[in-house]
Image: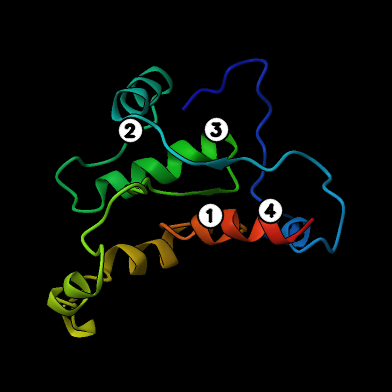
Amino acid sequence: MSRPALAPAAQPDVGALLGVIRRQRPPGRVHNLELFLDPEVKDALAARFGLEEGLDRADRHFALRRDVRLHAFLGYDGQRNWSEEHAGPIRGWQDFEAYPWPRVRDIDLSPLEWLEKNLPENYLPLENCLAMLEEGRRYLA
């Protein structure tokens, strides 16, 4: 895995990031959080910098492994998956009552379990939860 000559490796520091968000400390650097990368961009970066070397595409966690490598390579402190924010399956009480709510036992938590064991130290997984931080920023002023 090669690194561009002008891009020093940034080490994830979730403690510093959370301290800044909580207004407990001034930022020592700009903390990078990835909101979304198109699959084509991920593919191009992985190919150009050899980020898939040693990974097995047949591995069920291939995409997670590659994304962790990619985000570490880009110097991100965390990542978020994109979600639709303009419409959803529940638009009123009738939809709420009719919604097929999942049971915890039916939810596949294996991606989160894999991330728990395989994320680099000091890296923050923001699996669809950054929206809480985005909403909370309005109250920090």
Q: Would you name the residue on which mark 2 appears?
A: 52
Residue at x-position 84% and y-position 64% = 24
Q: Say if residue 135 shows up in the picture.
A: yes
Sequence-earlier tag: 1 or 3: 3
Q: Closest to the observer: 27 or 130?
A: 130
Q: Closest to the observer: 50 or 64?
A: 64
**Distance between the Cα atoms at labels 3 and 4?**
14 Å
Residue at x-position 48% and y-position 41% = 35
Sequence-earlier tag: 4 or 2: 4
**Distance between the Cα atoms at labels 4 and 2?**
24 Å
Q: Would you name the residue on which mark 4 appears?
A: 13
Q: Would you name the residue on which mark 1 appears?
A: 120
**Distance between the Cα atoms at labels 3 and 2?**
14 Å
Residue at x-position 36% and y-position 29% = 42
Q: Are marks 3 and 2 in contact (CB under 8 Å)?
A: no
**Distance between the Cα atoms at labels 2 and 1?**
17 Å
**Distance between the Cα atoms at labels 4 and 1?**
10 Å
Q: Are marks 2 and 1 in contact (CB under 8 Å)?
A: no
Residue at x-position 17% and y-position 79% = 97
